[in-house]
Image: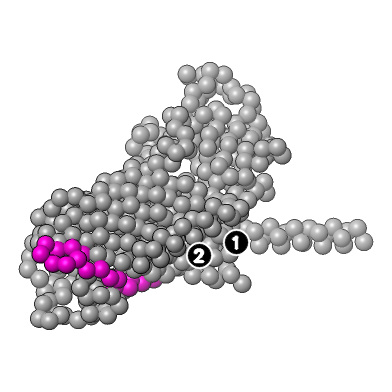
Amino acid sequence: MLSTAYNSRRAQLTLAATLMIIEIDNALAHGFAGERFFPATILTDDPFVADEMSLPEVSLNPPGPDGSQQTGILIDLSKRITPDTDFTISNEWRRLRAPGFTSVGGLGPLQTGGQYQLFVDGPHQALGLLGLNVTWGHTGRATVGAPDFTTLSPTFDFGKGFGDLPRSLPFLRPFAITGNLGFDFPTQATTAGVPNPNNFNYGFAFEYSFPYIQCCVKDIGLRPPFSQLIPLVEVAFTTPISRAPANQTTGTIQPGIIWAGPYFQIGAEAIIPANRLTGHGYGGVIQLHFYLDDIFPRSIGKPISEWW
Amino acid sequence: MDRLIMTFVVGVVALGTALPLQAHAFLDHASPPVGSSVPASPPIVALWFTQDLEPAFSSVTVTNEAGQRVDLGNARIPQDSPAELRIGLKPLPPGSYLVSWHVVSVDTHPTEGTFTFEVGRG
C-alpha cells in the first residue's frame, strides 16, 4: 500500500516536473541567446520572436530634401503563435508638414508580418530569424504617404553577442550586433506613372551592454538604473535595385540609449540623415516597449499554442 | 486621436503597475563579485537575483581552470532569501574560477550566465 502510494506520488511529481520543464523550455521568449540579452531595437527589426509591444513610439523625422517634416506615433505588437513563430502588426499615425502647405494628418499603411526563429545558439550568443512583412495597400491616408499598392518584404534578421570572446578581452565581450537584410517587392510596378522600385534594405544595431558587464564580465559598481543601460548606434539603408536611377540610397544613423527594466524598456535615439537625399538636420525618436511575456507570463504572454 | 492613444498608454501602464508581476531573473550582484580578485578562498559563492527563484530548476557550479568542480554540490536557495542562490566551496588554491549559473524565476522564465573570480592574485 505504502509502495503504491509512494509510486503514485512519485509519478505525480515526475509529471509535474515534466510539465514544468516543457513550460520552461517554451518560455524562452524575449531576446535571449544563452547569457546574452538583446533589447528590442527601435530602427531595425529584432532577430527574435517575442510577445512584446511598442506603445507608443513617437518620432520627429529630420526635414526631407523638400523641407517637409513628418511626426509619427507608432504602435507595434509582436505575438508568438508557437515558441518559434510569431506575427507582428503595426500602424502609425502621421502628421506631415510641408513648406507652403497646410499640415495633414492620418494613418499610415497597415503593416503585418510573420516570423520564424531559425536558430538560437546560446554558447555563441547568436540568433537568426526569417520573416515576411507585408505593407498593405489602400489601408492608410495617401496624403501622409500610405501607398495604393501592397509590398512584400522578406527579411533575414540576425544577432550576435561577443561574450564568447576570450575572457582576456573583457571590455569587448559586452559588444553585440544585430542586423537585417531584406527586400521590398511592390505588387504594382507604377503608381500614376511613377515607378515603385524593388528595394534592398539593410540595417545594423551596434550595442554595448552594461547589463552584460555587470552579470558576466566585471562588477564595476553600476547599480540600477545605470546597470540596465544599453548604449547603441543603429543604421538602416534602402537602395533601389530596379525601376529607379542608380545612387538613390537613403538611410539614417541613430545613436541612442535603451534602458531595459524587468517589464518594459524605454529607448531614445537621435535621427541623423545619412545623406542629402534622405534629408538634413536632425530628428529624434522615443519608444516605450513592453515585455508581454513578463507582464502576463501565464496568460497572453505565452505562445497562443500553449493557451489551452 | 492623440487623446485616444494617451488614454490607451496610461491604461496599459496602470494595468502593468497594478498586477503582481514576475519576470526574468537577472543577476544583481554576487559574492565574490563578478570579475573580482579575492585574497583568500571564500567559503561560499552567493548570487543575488532580481526575482525570486524556483529551487527545483536553479543551479550553480564552480570549476577551476582545469574544468574540475570545486564546489560542494550543495546549491540552495535560503528560505528567508528566495532571490539568492548559494553554494559551498572546497578550499581553493590561488587561481581563476568559473561560476556557471542557470536559474528559473518563479514564473518559469529561465536565464543563465557565467563569470570568473580569482583567488590569491589580488
Q: Secondary structure at mark 2?
A: loop
Chain to which the residue tagged by mark 1 belongs: A
The x and y percentages for residue A296 are 56, 60
Answer above or below: position of A289 versus A109: above
The residue where tag 2 is placed is: A83
Rendered residue at 68%/57% (across/down): A17
The residue where tag 1 is placed is: A298
The x and y percentages for residue B23 are 55, 51
Rendered residue at 51%/29% (across/down): B33
Please tell me which residue lies in front, A284 or A157.
Answer: A284
Residues shaded magenta: A96-118
User: Amino acid type of disc 1?
Assistant: Arg
Mostly what secondary structure, the magenta segment? strand
User: Amino acid type of disc 2?
Assistant: Pro
Quadrant where the C terminus of chain A is found in the figure = bottom right
Q: CA distance from mark 2 to mark 1?
A: 14 Å
The x and y percentages for residue A86 are 44, 68
Q: Secondary structure at mark 1?
A: loop
**Residue A118 visible in the current orientation:** no
Where is residue A16, by image quadrant?
bottom right
Residue A116 belongs to the span the image colors magenta: yes
Residue A66 belongs to the span the image colors magenta: no
Q: Along the horizontal axis of the image, is A165 left or right of A17?
A: left
Quadrant where the N terminus of chain A is found in the figure = bottom right
Answer above or below: position of A280 versus B88: below
